[in-house]
Amino acid sequence: MPCKRRVDRFASSRWGESLWVVALVLGCAGRAHTQSTPMVELRTTDASLVGDPISVRVTGLPPDVDVVLFSQLVDRSGRLWVSESTFRSSAEGTVDPARQTPIDDAWEGIDALGPFWSPLRKTKAGAHPEPADGHAERTAISALVDKRAVATAAVTRWYRSPEVEEVPVPDDTLAARMFVKRGDDRRSAVIVVPGSGGGVPAGTAEQLASHGHASLALGYFGEPQTVSELESVPLEYFDRAIEFLKAHPRVDPRRIAILGGSKGGELSLLLASRRDDIRAVVAAVPSSVVFQSIADGWPRTSSWSVDGEDLPFVPYVISNRFRESGRLSLLYEDSLENEDAVARATIPVDRIAGSILLVSGRDDWMWPATRMCDDIVARLKEAQFPHEVTHLAYDDVGHEVLTAGFRPVSWSRRVGGTRQGHAAAQADAWKRTLEFLARNLAAAN
């Protein structure tokens, strides 16, 4: 049978936007089957951004046969990710992970996300050509019957929309990269700060710019313009970055948010509590207090400083149970028992002048983020906080929850949770983060 290519457009979906279905038919299975042609339906949004919903279904198969879904993804670094999952086709000749459980225990239960989060990395960076010059990734899923591909489909998904450009940051005292869609209008803006891993989080900033925000990825330690370690980081550095952003001709200074995870979540809440021009805060797995620095050797210093003076901090308590287990969350749990230090170092979140979105995993092995988020919510409720407060707390999820979903999950047990739990949470949290930012950074009427 000659190969056929078909592209269909669906007028609506449960995600409220039109979808594309791309399928390349390779041939029929070996068993007699003349009524229809196997086809992989790979559906995503018109924008086809990384993190947007995506689904797969196979139709036109012989009924009641074993079908392997072979998933491949080449990411922006040219690395290949691969997984296989086996299903039994239905009486109608379909395989649909949203309705069927794999028969090979590739994951637990019915999971429409399975073919997208389950791939594992098979090659190093640069092993394959980078899709779209490193601004996209390529996903392909094939249906195999009797070890033979009967149909396949592929789609390019963008980290950075083709409409987004990187614009110069002329202040050479900032370790920053800025992204915005082409044009001359003023847009809402999001400052993105990293956690303890450091660096300049350009990937998240590109994704937010693709959703319409001007975005500033801002590193704050370990860069040539910054302190060398996450120790006594001067908050004046961030004040300078915020003032730069407010003065930028593509930014509406009345619509600025900050987003960070882990130590970046702690920082985001702290900065917003000290300024009246941050309209929204997204803090993923954050702390409710200022903790001791995490510089080499764990010196008895604060993570943050103002006017050259360390902010009050909660010092680490090195307990026997932490030493014996090596589980980092126990270090922080024991440290939070120091009530006097906690009282001095608590972040005054009730002073924040905008809405707050908190995201946590209930099985966080890095620090007790859900407990600290619950404390933040309780204090805001007691203070009759006038702005929106939302806490998304997920079961079976550890420390790596706020990242674009519907793609392979890199996970290790040391962060807590499970791969499958993280996959579901990441898909939901990213969607709700985008909704939160759109809602709270909307232009004033």
Image: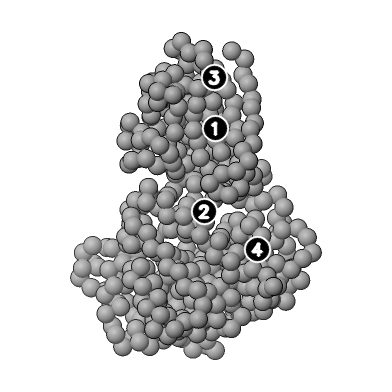
Mark carried by residue 213 = 4
Q: Identify the mark nearer the N-term, 1 or 4.
A: 1
Closer to the camera, 359 or 416? 359
Helix, strand or loop for disc 1: strand
Disc 3 residue type? Thr
Depicted 333 relative to depicted 41: above or below: below
Q: Circle 2 is placed at which residue position? A: 404
Helix, strand or loop for disc 4: loop
Residue 87 quadrant:
top left
Q: Identify the mark nearer the N-term, 2 or 1.
A: 1
Residue 216 visible from this viewpoint = no
Q: Identify the mark nearer the N-term, 3 or 2.
A: 3
Q: Identify the mark nearer the N-term, 4 or 2.
A: 4
Locate residue 94 relative to residue 216 in the image: left or right.
left
Disc 2 residue type? Ala
Disc 4 residue type? His
Q: CA distance from mark 3 to mark 4?
A: 43 Å
Q: Circle 1 is placed at which residue position? A: 41
Q: Circle 3 is placed at which residue position? A: 37
Query: Badges 1 and 3: C-beta atoms under 8 Å apart?
Result: no
* Rendering coords of residue 260 (x, y %): 51, 67
Depicted 405 relative to depicted 33: above or below: below
Closer to the camera, 439 or 186? 439
